[in-house]
């Protein structure tokens, strides 16, 4: 099968509250679609096989690996990415601020995936304890921070949201 | 790290999906995608056609009755993890599911996908073997049911005809009071298990073992029921000596030998983890 024979699919979805539409072949991942077709480069690709968590976005309220979903599978879905946590010109969200306050960001590569995971986790279990928090964050790798500041920031955000 | 080209199909009815499988010889079904998409990205697999069954109705859902637990093949692992009725009926599922990938992969991953992928270390596959599940599959020739013991054919290959789709998993409940144990060892939490052991154990009024099931995952291509240990335990008080005897049989199993871990190491782990899982089950069986 040659590249030129590939069908272009139109993918229409809601991203951060706005309807977006673009075309891609079936083999485009949701992460690549968000980055290259929609210009939302806050979602990062670390491993492309589902283990690092850098590509985590919310699809219909659930945190998922953007590298393990095809864009065509998100047709009609509601997607939230890191860009949706705050306006470009606006203040940081409470969650983002907690990360800034606790120095939980160094290079920032893992951060969007962690924040989007936390949006789901804090929404589901606002009274989460530290052990559960570490478990919930275990699907996101960070090479820089050693995790402690991330856990502190996440727990502080949980407390602030309660 | 991008897939090769393929045609994408999104059938809306089971018959349509079966028809597509029959028509296309080099096709893969896409369920949760948490295994298949990684394989596609790494080009471990290069199908000409990907048949996305996420749009098929009625394949997801959990039903718990007095005797049976029925789980639709497309039920998300995270949904299973949070189903209160299932957790009451079969609490071992919660213990096992915390080891299945991570919460993000469990949001998409399905029980049917895990079963059909048949990774030797898959916890859900091991649990279905522990419970002697019955699997319902549908194909061109219609619907059939097969026992879990007959489901694995070869390494990562289920006993399915090319046009067949797994639709439902039926687990007979352990209706008597019983305990459960689930222990797994992996190098990092969330990694594939090197060895996982699941135990269900019921005691009679005298405190002797009335019924026991032990499954070892990760040792061979398919999860292994430790029948000799199960038989050994029946009618016995679950004292440390007897549990040690039962665990010792786990050290005799056939185990895979590969670049990562030797057969000896897997056998050693099987022995140790069987002991721990048995102790867990005995503790909550009373």
Image (cartoon, rainbow, N blue to C red):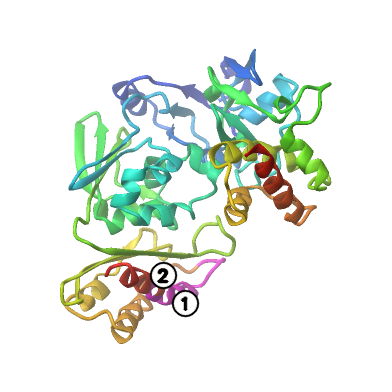
Secondary element at tag 1: helix
Secondary element at tag 2: loop
For the question of whether residue B35 can be seen, the reply is: no
Q: Position of residue A78 (x, y in %)?
A: 57, 21
In the displayed structure image, the side of residue A18 where residue B237 appears, left or right: left
The residue located at (75%, 21%) in the rendering is A39
Give the alpha-carbon distance from disc 2 to disc 1, as whole Å: 8 Å
Q: Is residue B274 magenta?
A: yes
Q: Position of residue A88 (x, y in %)?
A: 81, 22
The residue located at (37%, 19%) in the rendering is B12
Q: Which image quadrant for residue B203?
A: bottom left
Residue B166 shows which numbered tag? none
| Residue density around tag 2, few if under 14, some if 14–19, many if 20 or more, within 10 Å | some
Front in this rendered view, residue B199 or A41:
B199
Chain that bears disc 1: B
Q: Which image quadrant for residue B221?
A: bottom left
Quarter of the rendering occupied by the N terminus of chain A: top right
Magenta residues span B258-275
Q: Is residue A10 above or below residue B130?
A: above
Q: Is residue A82 magenta?
A: no
The residue located at (33%, 21%) in the rendering is B13
Q: Position of residue B74 (x, y in %)?
A: 38, 35
Residue B255 shows which numbered tag? 2
Residue B264 shows which numbered tag? 1
């Amino acid at each position: 099968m040659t590249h030129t024979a590939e069908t272009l699919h139109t993918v229409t979805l809601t991203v951060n509250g706005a309807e977006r539409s673009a075309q891609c072949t079936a083999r485009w991942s949701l992460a690549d679609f968000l980055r290259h077709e929609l210009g939302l480069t806050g979602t990062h690709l670390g491993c492309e096989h589902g283990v690092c968590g850098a590509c985590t976005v919310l699809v219909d309220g659930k945190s998922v690996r953007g590298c393990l979903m095809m864009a065509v599978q998100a047709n009609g879905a509601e997607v939230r990415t890191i860009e949706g946590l705050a306006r470009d010109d606006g203040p940081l969200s409470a969650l983002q601020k907690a990360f800034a306050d606790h120095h939980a960001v160094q290079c920032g590569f893992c951060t969007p995936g962690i924040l989007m995971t936390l949006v789901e986790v804090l929404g589901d279990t606002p009274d989460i304890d530290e052990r559960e928090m570490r478990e919930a964050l275990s699907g996101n790798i960070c090479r820089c921070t050693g995790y402690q500041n991330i856990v502190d920031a996440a727990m502080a955000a949980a407390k602030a949201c309660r | 790290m991008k897939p090769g080209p393929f045609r994408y199909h999104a059938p809306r009815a089971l018959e349509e999906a079966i028809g597509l499988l029959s028509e296309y010889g080099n096709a893969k079904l896409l369920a949760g995608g948490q295994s298949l998409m990684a394989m596609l990205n790494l080009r471990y697999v290069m199908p000409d056609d990907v048949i996305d069954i996420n749009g098929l109705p009625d394949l997801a859902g959990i039903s718990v009755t007095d005797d049976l637990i029925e789980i639709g093949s497309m039920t998300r692992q995270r949904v299973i993890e949070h189903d209160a009725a299932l957790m009451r009926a079969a609490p071992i599922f919660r213990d096992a599911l915390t080891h299945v990938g991570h919460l993000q992969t469990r949001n998409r991953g399905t029980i049917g996908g895990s079963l059909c992928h048949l990774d030797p270390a898959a916890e859900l596959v091991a649990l279905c073997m522990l419970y002697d599940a019955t699997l319902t599959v549908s194909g061109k020739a219609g619907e059939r049911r097969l026992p879990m013991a007959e489901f694995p054919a070869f390494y990562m290959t289920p006993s399915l005809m090319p046009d067949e789709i797994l639709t439902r998993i039926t687990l007979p409940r352990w209706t008597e009071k019983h305990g459960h144990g689930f222990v797994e060892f992996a190098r990092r939490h969330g990694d594939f298990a090197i060895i996982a052991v699941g135990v269900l154990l019921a005691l009679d009024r005298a405190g002797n073992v009335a019924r026991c099931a032990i499954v070892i995952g990760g040792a061979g291509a398919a999860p292994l029921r430790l029948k000799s240990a199960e038989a050994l335990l029946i009618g016995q008080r679950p004292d440390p000596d007897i549990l040690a005897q039962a665990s010792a049989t786990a050290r005799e199993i056939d185990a895979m030998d590969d670049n990562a871990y030797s057969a000896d190491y897997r056998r050693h782990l099987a022995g140790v983890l069987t002991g721990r899982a048995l102790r867990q089950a005995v503790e909550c069986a009373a």
